[in-house]
Image (spheres, grey):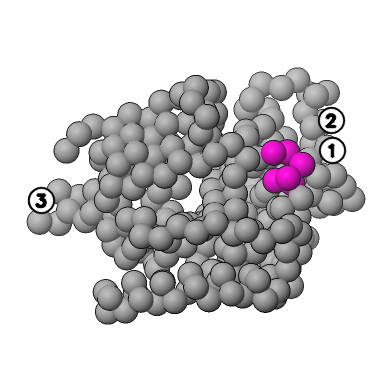
């Protein structure tokens, strides 16, 4: 199997995968998680990955983030891009205030204290938490903690966000509000987003394009553009129609594997 490189590039895509494979283990115990995945995400595009549990969605994000190395193929990123990764759990430091949590990535970037203070205030305004900077994570609701986690990712000042089920643990109303917030931030900052979700309607609500992965090993088996004008409502007939089409294809794929 060929070795893989993850390198910057100057082409038009923000993220590109070419024939990417990932194998865990060796010999008889080897598990092929991803098999020949090729995907080009344009700058400013919002792409959602959906598929059954274990199909390799999170593995793909980890590879793009550089947390793991592919077994074959190539991953290329826009010049100087270091993607930010947001998980399902906010993973905030409980002993720090909200401001303190946001200060950590800025400090790691080497920003001086005065600039960090200004950036923290700006980030809090961006996620509508300007009055909660002195609170600690346990004093916040689940949705507010996820807003802090989003602000912390934005503190990396990267044009590419990788989001792994960031709203999966939230109630429907909070999730819907955060969809609006994420869409606003994505549009204002002209971000590129690669978003993993099990919720097909969430994908139709947010995405410019939905990518469906097969059951293990993960391969791209379907792609569709969501040509519904923004802003969107998750309960709109147009979104429901697209979600139904993707769900039917997902059910067929899951049934094919007897899951």
The location of residue 229, given as percent across then percent down, is 71, 58
Residue under the image location 30 percent in, 52 percent down: 34
Residue drawn at x 57%, y 63% is: 203
Q: CA distance from mark 3 to mark 2?
A: 53 Å
Q: Is residue 194 above or below residue 52?
A: above
Quarter the C terminus occupies: bottom left
Distance CA(mark 1)–CA(mark 2): 5 Å
> Horizontally, is 200 left or right of 74 in the view?
right
Is residue 186 found inside the magenta-colored segment of the image? Answer: yes
At mark 2, the secondary structure is: helix
- Pointer 1 residue: 121
* Horizontal relation, residue 106 to residue 17: left or right: right
Comparing 49 with 249, the one in front is 249
Q: Are marks 1 and 3 in contact (CB under 8 Å)?
A: no
Q: Is residue 238 magenta?
A: no
Chain part drawn in magenta: 185-190
Picture coordinates of residue 193, whole percent (x, y): 59, 46
Image quadrant where residue 238 sits? bottom right
- Which residue lies under the disc numbered 3? 27
Relative vertical location of residue 62 with respect to residue 3 in this rendering, above or below: below
Q: Is residue 196 above or below residue 16?
A: below
Labels 1 & 2 near each other (Cβ < 8 A): yes
Q: Label 1 to label 3, Cα distance in Å?
A: 52 Å
Give x and y (percent) for residue 48.
53, 56
Work out whether residue 119 can be spotted: yes
Q: Is residue 73 left or right of residue 138?
A: left
Q: Are marks 3 and 2 in contact (CB under 8 Å)?
A: no
Query: Label for residue 118?
Result: 2
């Amino acid at each position: 199997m060929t070795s893989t490189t993850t390198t910057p590039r100057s082409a038009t895509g923000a993220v590109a995968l070419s024939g990417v494979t990932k194998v865990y283990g060796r010999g008889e115990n080897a598990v092929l998680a991803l098999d020949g995945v090729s995907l080009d995400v344009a700058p400013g595009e919002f792409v959602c990955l959906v598929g059954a549990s274990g199909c390799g969605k999170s593995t793909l994000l980890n590879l793009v983030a550089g947390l793991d190395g592919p077994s074959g193929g190539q991953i290329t990123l826009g010049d100087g891009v270091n993607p930010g990764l947001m998980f399902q759990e906010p993973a905030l430091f409980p002993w720090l205030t909200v401001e303190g949590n946001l200060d950590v990535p800025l400090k790691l970037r080497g920003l001086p204290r005065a600039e960090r203070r200004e950036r923290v205030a700006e980030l809090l305004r961006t996620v509508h938490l300007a009055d909660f900077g002195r609170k600690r994570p346990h004093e916040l609701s689940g949705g507010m903690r996820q807003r802090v986690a989003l602000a912390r990712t934005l503190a990396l000042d990267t044009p590419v966000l990788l989001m792994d089920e960031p709203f999966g643990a939230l109630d429907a109303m909070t999730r819907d509000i955060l969809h609006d917030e994420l869409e606003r931030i994505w549009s204002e900052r002209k971000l590129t987003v690669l978003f993993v979700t099990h919720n097909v309607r969430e994908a139709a609500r947010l995405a410019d394009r939905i990518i469906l992965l097969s059951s293990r090993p993960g391969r791209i088996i379907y792609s569709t553009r969501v040509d519904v004008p923004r802003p969107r409502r998750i309960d709109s007939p147009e979104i429901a129609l697209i979600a139904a089409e993707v769900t039917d294809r997902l059910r067929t794929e899951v049934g094919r594997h007897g899951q």
